[in-house]
Amino acid sequence: MKKNCKYIKSINYRDRLQNQAGFTLVELLVALAITGIVISLTGSGLYALMKADRRSQIETTDRLELERSLAFMTDEIKMSQQIVTDSTFAATNTIGFNPASGSSRIQPILILYPAPTSGLIKPIVYYLADPPNSSVWVGPRVIYRWGPTLMQNGNYSDGNGNDLTSLPLGSPVEYYNEVLVDGISAVATAEAATGCESSYSNAAPVVAERVGFYACIAPDKKSVKLWMSKQPNPSATARSINALVVTRSN
């Protein structure tokens, strides 16, 4: 009887050991396969989410850059007396316009003649160009502004921190080339393929040469319709903005 009891206890002990032995190789392989699938699906979903978030960030940044640039340009147009686009401007260059060093394919779009109260004599030029190859600008086109600096009070500076309105008319003024917007499209938008309406008949540039920045100016040279399109490369989504601006100075 004692022998039978020992035998039964031995069997129960072996059963407990077998129950505590862990997973079999097949079970481990199945678990690893399932884990790999879950990780793969999770990684793909996370990557897609990050990619979508990145696209959203780029779109928001592009939109903000265009809006800020258009707001700056709009304010300066309102301060101006006249908006001019002259097909002979680049050839005659009677105002001493000096584009950014190393830039190419210069296309003056807006020539702003300031109000007499501004203290300026020479106009301000917004132009489209290819940036220098060695610059930090990605292009393919950029919008440059050639003009004096603006002070915090909204008046122009002579370049030495002096308010032009407090200086005699004709005082020396330093003009600078500054990039207003980078990544401007080198491809014409659908709107660019149409001419200006009769009430805004002065085009800058002509339809055949329009890409990511162009304008239609009224015959009285007091109002302008602007278009800007940002597209750093052909695979990027184009972001566009436009506005109608009227001068307020006489």
Image: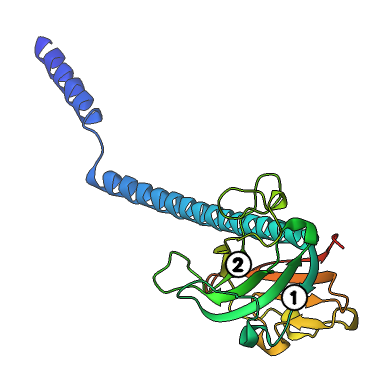
Taking depth in this image into account, of 140 and 76 the one nearest to the observer is 76
The answer to whether residue 234 of the structure is visible from this angle is: no
Taking depth in this image into account, of 202 and 7 the one nearest to the observer is 202
Above or below for 56 versus 238: above
The answer to whether residue 157 of the structure is visible from this angle is: yes
Q: Quadrant of the N terminus?
A: top left
Q: Which mark is residue 126?
A: none
Query: Residue 250 falls in which quadrant of the image?
Result: bottom right
Q: Secondary structure at mark 1?
A: strand
State the image coordinates of residue 174 (x, y, percent, origin top left).
57, 61
State the image coordinates of residue 83 (x, y, percent, origin top left).
78, 71
Question: For the view shown, which residue lies furthest in the bottom direction?
Answer: 208
* Residue 119 appears left or right of 1: right
Residue with the mark numbered 1: 215
Above or below for 180 versus 154: below
* Residue 141 appears left or right of 112: left
Tell me which numbered mark, 2 or 1, is placed earlier along the sequence. Answer: 2
The kind of residue tagged 1 is Ala
Q: Residue at x 70, y 76 (%)?
A: 214
Residue with the mark numbered 2: 146
State the image coordinates of residue 166 (x, y, percent, origin top left).
70, 48
Q: Residue at x 48, y 68 (%)?
A: 138
Q: Secondary structure at mark 2?
A: strand
Question: For the view shown, which residue lies furthest in the front direction?
Answer: 168
